[in-house]
Amino acid sequence: MDENVETRRELLTLDELTARVGMSVRNIRFYTTKGLVPPPIRRGRSGYYSSEHIARLELVQELQAHGFTLSAIERYVAGIPVDASPEEIALHRTMLAPWQADLPVEMSRAELDRRTGRTLSDDDLTTLAALGIVFRTKRGRYEVAVSQLSVGLGLLDLGFPVEAALAAAEVYAEHGRQVAHELNELFRTMVWPVYKESGASAETLREVVERLKPLSIASLVSAYEAGMDEDRRQRAERRARRASGD
């Protein structure tokens, strides 16, 4: 870390840092010993913290919110260059943030049953989880996509097979990972360098990504619909060839 650059940045004491990121002194020191954030900047006998410390701690918080274990967080952070700027670290955090406007609502099992008006079976919960609607948390509660709950209950009423839901979830997961990887590479290699060269702030970059998220979701839906149309067309052509004896 270039101390000449740091002298031009706002430096925080440990107490100021805890207030800024909403994290305890104990946790900050723990993450420092784990190498998730760099050690404090020494000024005589005192230690100070910069915007890089803030960005990395906020990234750790974001990863925790997504259910990453400590070892998973360590692996993720290890992939970020040690000389990454706060803006570059903010890009990672922005890409992790939810892409859908409706955030899940946490409920107890009793609250979920009241909300659905029924006692959900284990198979029901497995199906709803595979459909991306209800997830059990480590605390024994449930995160619920409320806007999609009625859709999921309707599928349960129609006898949607749990095996199909699980198979579909595997398809979504496999292709979702590929899309996520390629989009991250696109932002890293084509978007971020342009804004970095222009001197744009982390907040500007965050706003750009947030504006692109709904467009990306709409584009994925359009691509899916086009793919379905093409698949139906090809199937119809194959049936026509078989019927004609070709």
Image (cartoon, rainbow, N blue to C red):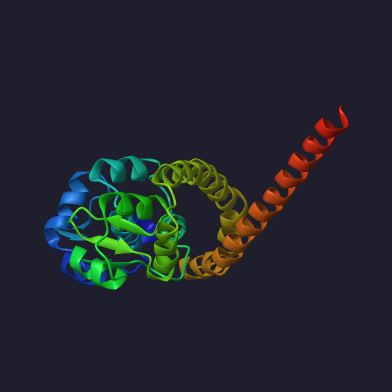
Tell me if residue 41 comes above or below residue 171 in the rendering.
below
Of the pair 105 and 19, the residue shown nearer to us: 105
Residue 10, given in percent of the width and then of the height, sits at 33, 69
Residue shown at 38% from the left, 68% from the top: 103
Residue 188 shows up from this direction: yes
Of the pair 236 and 64, the residue shown nearer to us: 236
**Apparent side of residue 84 relative to residue 224 in the rendered image (left or right):** left
**Apparent side of residue 132 relative to residue 60 in the rendered image (left or right):** right
Residue 233, given in percent of the width and then of the height, sits at 77, 45
**Apparent side of residue 217 relative to residue 83 in the rendered image (left or right):** right
| Quadrant of residue 246 within the rendered picture | top right
Residue 2 shows up from this direction: no
Residue 196, given in percent of the width and then of the height, sits at 55, 59
Of the pair 180 and 26, the residue shown nearer to us: 180
Residue 176, given in percent of the width and then of the height, sits at 51, 47
Residue shown at 16% from the left, 56% from the top: 27
Residue shown at 22% from the left, 67% from the top: 17
Residue shown at 78% from the left, 35% from the top: 238
Count of all numbered marks drawn on residues in the image: 0
